[in-house]
Image (tube, rainbow, N blue to C red):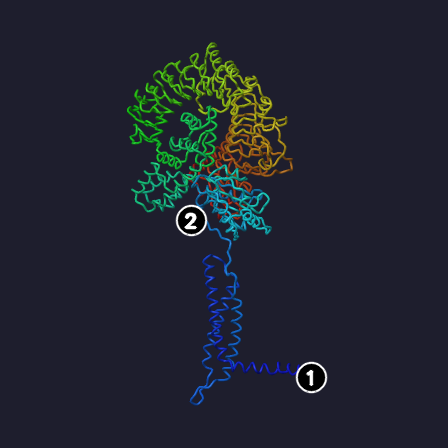
Amino acid sequence: MAEGIGFSIAGKLSEYAVDPILRQFKYLFFYNSNIQNLRNKVKDLENKRTEVQLRVDEANRNAEVIGPSISEWLLKVVDLKKEIDKFLNTTRSSELQCLFIRCPNLKSRYSQSRKATKKIAEVDKLLVGGTFERVGYRTLPVHIPNLAPHYFEGFETRRLTKNTIMEALKDKDISIIGICGMPGVGKTTMANEIAHEVKVEKLFDEVLIAVVSQNQDINKIQDQLAENLGLRLEEKTNNFVRSGRLRARLGGDDGKRILVILDDVWEEIDFGTLGIPSPGGQKILKIMFTTRIENVCSYMGAQRKFKVEVLPKEEAWQLFKDTAGISDHATNVVGIAKEVADECGGLPLALVIVAKALKDSNVYAWRDALKQLQNYQVTEQVYSRIELSYKYLKDNEHRSLLLLCSLFAEDESIPIETLVRYSRGLGLFQNTDTLSETRDRAYSIADNLKSRYLLLPGEDEEVKLHDLVRDFCLMVASKHKHEYLVKHADLKEWPENDIHESCSAISLTFNELYKLPSGLKYQNLKLLRVLCNWRLWISRRQNISEEFFKCMKELRVVEFNWMSIQIPSSIQLLTGLRTLCFDCCVLESEISVIGSLKKLEILTFYYTCLNVDFPSEIAELSNLRSLDLRFKKGPCPLPRGILLGMKKLEELYLGDYFETRDEEQRYIIKEVSSLTCLNTFQISTDDAQFLMQILQALHLEKLERFQIIGTQEKGLSTKNNHVTRSLSLQEGIDGSMLFQPVINSVMRRTEHLQIDKLNVVKNLANELDEDGLINLKTLRLTFGGLEYLIDTTKSIPTGTFGKLELLELVDLQDLIRICNGNLPRMEHFGRGVSEPQLFCNLKNLYICRCGKIRSMFSETVAKCMVNLQCLYIESCWKLEEVVSIDTTDNEVSDMLGFPKLKEVTLQGLISFKSFTSQYIRLTLFNQVALPNLEKLDIISLGLEVKLLYDERNITSLHKLRQLTVEDLDDVSELFNFEGLSDTQDNVENVLGQLRSLELETLPELVHITRMVPKGIRVFRNLTSLVV
């Protein structure tokens, strides 16, 4: 045991005493091998460094971020390599000169061998640490939109749209936003600009952009979203897994605010299929998308929809000029360049493409470009954008109706009723047996085309066609071998062309025309539309050759407008003719030949003078479905028996029936009662009894459209070509007729109501219709003893005046108030209120010469008027306020807002005090916000007027473009900026958009503006000043 302990002790003594001594001798004995080993290790390290660097370079090329440990390792390798190289250079001095030979320097060798051993250990450590699984990491992409320089800076319309969208993105209650507009209008540019701005303002932590396009590819969209997130979706076929991974990333609980932008959406997308969580349950997730199809906004559940419109003329010219590099001093080009810019129709895509193409061009190139654009030569890029929408249309019926619209002149309003006539005559629609069904189809298609921005909305059931879309349609027509001959400018004779055989439609407008030529050969012509300047209708007759229609036997639609003509006998050769229109014409010779057109379904004489007797042969048109007899001058009454054979007749426009005898009235009533298919009826008469009798003879329940006019004034039937559902009882017709059952029945279905001298009613809505006149869209009342339009202190039906868009009250001397009493107090309509409220759709309110009215309506009623756009009040001498505020004496109400009000006129109000009854401020619009006010006229008011006094009125002046202030005796200043600074929100925009300022008959005026803070540039866009 003792011996074992001794050996153990001896071993330990050897380990601690002998081994260190041997290690020191090893540095001397193995000097050469240690140095060589170090050199070999350095080569290994250099190879390793090169390998890692190659991987780093590849990661950099893929825009990956290099891990910090990799960069640190590379630096350590470089530093260590420098140290070793320097060290190896010193090993040459490890020998001494001994007599005639070189001897090793033992001290130096010992030191260098020891250092080499330590460096080998450092190299080994780096070699082990240089084994990296990956060197680069993908990062979230930073979206830098490819915008034209200062794209929004100079364009106020774009800036305002962008700001409104930004406000919606900041609204916590809005999670889905749609941006819509026609192709090439700048929707994607707008979305990119917003993406950039929300990143700058840090509204969102992550912004994802994916292009959807027409051919919706779910995998491709998901890949784009994943790339934005730095997420790898390895699965290519299992969409359940792919969408689940995206959903988990987007719906995580890390609190990140995320904006998803889907560009170019053509149809509804299921967010769940993509992997986007429902925004409604994710307050930090919002979705914004762009689309050229307005209905997609509804399909996608957009809570706010923003339309990007074409640029107004001034902004369009600025964009064009800047892009083309045109100086204002380039007088040889500016004039024609403006014409070229106008041909682009305000479409940014076309403006930029054409401007870039013509930049630095000579004047002859500009002239040639203008000629091409005027001849429908759309640029290829613009053409392709519109073509995509055209091809995506549902069917050929949509395409055919769109092409029909190109027959009209540039910027011309196109009545949809005219399209109905053309479509019926051409047989465009399948499975439409009746004219009513054709109308429904035409209106549905027109709505679809509007939702895709291929058609633009117009006035009163009209549409318009953007110039470039029109050019595209004419190009399509020519390519598909059914060419259109369309000329509407400076035409004095029939145009020469070489498309006789292929021509399917002709639409011409003549400035001068003496004769329609003979010998025209259009064997495949289906539609002929000829118009003259209206002055020719008055001054000159246009001769038509008797053989004019001889080689046009395939005609289905013929329309003449503003022409003084005789009908040629060759018209009887048009055995397939279905639509024949003489609108605003003078017919000099007998027209009995029309009776031979047995297939005719539509015959119109709107605003036409018939200087001959109405032929009995018309009674033979048994297939007729629409007969328009609204002559400017013509037969009254119709000859007996004309209507009896027209059993298919759906539409009858009788026109004016004045001073008719009892016998004539009886047979007209009998013939009208035989028309069992009638769904549209129009008449204007001065005989109240006859009016009630003919209405009783009709099948009122079948009437879809009607225009009933009781009046002493002739010619009212041709004031408006479009017939909806209107009832007008004017001067000379007793208003008490409204209580007659047949008239009252019509009134309940009426959308447009006009009543003169209604003396038997004090409270319109409560007394006339127990249902609350819920169908009314326009209401015009003049004279009479009316005291209230509606009395809310009594029971009122739900939806009363809920559809009313226009209200006009004139010369109602007993009117006390528009609405008597208050509604239950509510928040602004539109937030959580589901059923329509009183006046919630009112857009235009006109009140004039109502002598007793002091206050128009209460605050609760005013809060329902969220869609009011125009307010006109004139010569109401006792009016003190527009809105009475529902507060106690010591209570101050919140600001009252009219978010869509654009035009306000206050004129001849000598007792006026303020817009609201709270006179706590010195401004005209105290406690009122008008954020979209553009036009303001203040004339002859009996008070001191100030338009700006403190910060509460600032937003009402942001968009003001036209201001007129006249005939005010006690006005010393208009805009007082005292107390405001340029650091306050929105102050810099005050009066920034004002373009026209008229100040007349203001004897006490001293200051237009006063105390304007530095940094605020008022009137910077003023172009017209009248003082």
Residue 633 location, x and y as percent?
40, 17
Give the mark count: 2
Q: Secondary structure at mark 2?
A: loop
Q: Secondary structure at mark 1?
A: helix
Quadrant in the picture for residue 400: top left
Depth order, front residue of 674/324: 674
Residue 1004 location, x and y as percent?
49, 36
Crowding at mark 2 (Cα within 10 Å: few <14, some 14-19, many 20+): few
Depth order, front residue of 937/415: 415
Three-letter amino acid code of the residue under disc 1: Glu
Residue 357 location, x and y as percent?
35, 45
Residue carrying label 2: 149
**Mark sitting on residue 331:** none
Farthest right residue in view? 1
| 2 and 1 marks in contact (CB < 8 Å) | no
Which quarter of the figure is the C terminus placed in? top left
Farthest bottom residue in view? 99
Q: Is residue 748 above or below residue 958?
A: above
Between the C-alphas of marks 2 and 1, the distance is 96 Å
